[in-house]
Structure formats: C-alpha cells, structure tokens
Image (spheres, helix red, strand yellow):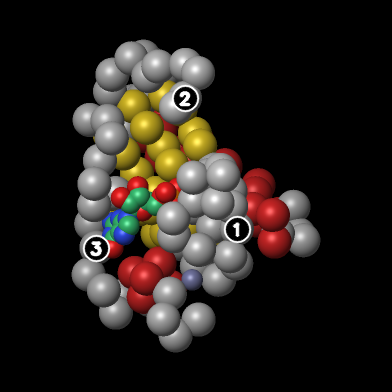
Amino acid sequence: MDDCIFCKIANGEIPSDFVYQDDEVAVFKDVNPQAPVHLLVIPKKHVKSAAEVSDPAVFSALVGRAVEVARKLGLDKDGYRMVINTGEQGGQTVPHLHLHLLAGRNLGWPPG
Ligand code: 5GP
Ligand code: ZN
C-alpha cells in the first residue's frame, strides 16, 4: 500500500521509534501516547483491519509479540492492556491493522 502511513513506518520510509522488529511484526512508540507506555504492534504486511484478516496466524504473531515485548519491558508486573480498534465505531483511525499496548497507569474501564 503506497500511501499507508504504517506501511511506510514498517519499511523505514518514515523514521520511527522502534522497540522491536522481525520479519513479520514491528513494534514502535505511538506518536500521541495515551499512557506512559503506548506502543503499536503491527504486521509488516498490509491488512486494513482485524475484520479483514483471514489467517489467524496474523493475530498469533501480533498478540504473541506484544506479550513478549511487555515481558521484556517488565510491564507484566503491574499489568497492561492490549487493544485493537476495528472500523469506524471501533475507533480505528489508521487503516492498517495495529494492536495498542498500553501500560504505566491505571487504565479506566469501560473505555469511552
Ligand atoms: P487507532 O485510532 O487507529 O486505533 O490508532 C492509531 C494510532 O496511531 C493513534 O494512537 C495515533 O496516535 C497513532 N499514529 C498515527 N499516526 C502515527 C505516526 O505517524 N507515527 C506513530 N508512531 N503513530 C501514529
Ligand atoms: Zn499499510
């Protein structure tokens, strides 16, 4: 996807603050953090949203890496939240699948 901002981040065209990368997944800091730790976990291969995923291995890669990164950063001690906003009413603003990893404060529930 030529005009996708997260594809450009994944391929290095737009510089970003990476925390972790492998062949399938990139993890970088959200530009507008909503918590002391706010990371985005994305598949490098473009897919618009969770609703468009056909291979469940995509979710395995995303959640698996998110949990590994959380463990490496010691976030599991106090806890964290993983969120995948999906579609318009789900609050998705960037049309490239991403998982939010949030931590470092008490996170309210229910969400707004
Ligand atoms: P959504 O609302 O789609 O679930 O989340 C999109 C997230 O991407 C937002 O938290 C927003 O701050 C973040 N974001 C949007 N553009 C950029 C960018 O260019 N770089 C980074 N690092 N984060 C971005
Ligand atoms: Zn993309």
Distance between mark 1 and mark 2 Cα atoms: 20 Å
Q: Residue 16 carries which label?
A: 3
- The amino acid pointed to by label 1 is Ser
Residue 59 horizontal/vertical position (percent): 65, 49
Residue 26 placement, left or right of 84: left
Look at the picture and state if 54 lies above or below 40.
Answer: below
Which residue, given by chain and number where applicable, does mark 1 sit on?
49
Looking at the image, can residue 61 be seen?
no
Crowding around mark 1 (Cα neighbors within 10 Å: few <14, some 14 to 19, many 20+) is some
Residue 94 visible here: yes
Determine if the C-beta at disc 3 is less than 8 A from ligand 1: yes
Closest to the observer, 95 or 45: 95
Q: Does the residue labelled 2 lie within 8 Å of ligand 1?
A: no
Which residue does the numbered mark 2 point to in the structure image? 111
Three-letter code, disc 3: Ser
Classify mark 3: residues with Cα within 10 Å, few (<14), some (14-19) or many (20+).
some
The residue closer to the viewer here, 25 or 97, is 97
Amino acid type at circle 2 is Pro
Left or right of 48: which side holds 66? Answer: left
Furthest-bottom residue in this view? 2
Residue at the far front in the pictured view: 89
Disc number lying in front (1 or 2):
2
Q: Say if 91 sits above or below 23 in the image.
A: above
Q: Which of marks 1 and 2 is nearer the N terminus?
A: 1
Labels 3, 2: front one = 2
Q: Do the residues labelled 1 and 2 touch (CB within 8 Å)?
A: no
Q: In which quarter of the image is residue 71?
A: top left
Circle 3 SS class? loop
Q: Is residue 105 above or below residue 94?
A: above
Mark 3 and mark 1: span between their CA atoms? Answer: 21 Å
Tag 1's secondary structure?
A: loop
